[in-house]
Image (cartoon, helix red, strand yellow):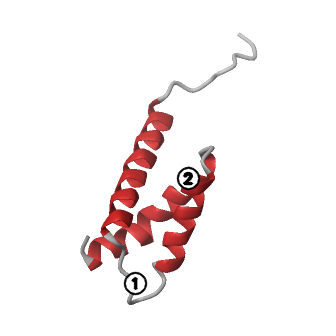
Amino acid sequence: MTEGELDEILTFEWPGVIRWAKRQSDEWLAQFALSIAGKGKRKSWRPTSKQVRVMRRMLSEAKADNHRLLTAEPDIELIER
């Protein structure tokens, strides 16, 4: 992961991943996402190869869930005709 790609992910996409992770029933995911956000504030920090794999997987899953939410049929309740 390049420095530019890391910066872009942490700035624009990671906040959404954090929100997604908090909605999951896995506390580890939420803690990992918050941990990466905290470490990402240090200029000299670079994720390990394992962290990169987990970050990419989480980003992919968060985007897929978001896409499902956006394309799902809304629950509309007809009040009157």
Rendered view: 27 above or below 41: above
Rendered view: 54 above or below 37: above
The residue tagged 1 is: 45
Amino acid type, callout 2: Ala
The percent position of residue 33, horizontal first and vertical second, equals: 52, 63
Crowd around label 1: few <14 · some 14–19 · many ≥20 (10 Å): few
**Does residue 73 appear in this view?**
yes
The C terminus: image quadrant: top right
> What residue is rendered at 49% in x and 79% in y?
39
The percent position of residue 24, horizontal first and vertical second, equals: 59, 45
Which residue, as the protein is rendered here, is positioned at the far left? 2
Rendered view: 69 above or below 63: above
Regarding mark 2 in the picture, which secondary structure is present there? helix
The residue tagged 2 is: 21
Q: Quadrant of residue 46?
A: bottom left
The percent position of residue 56, horizontal first and vertical second, equals: 35, 57
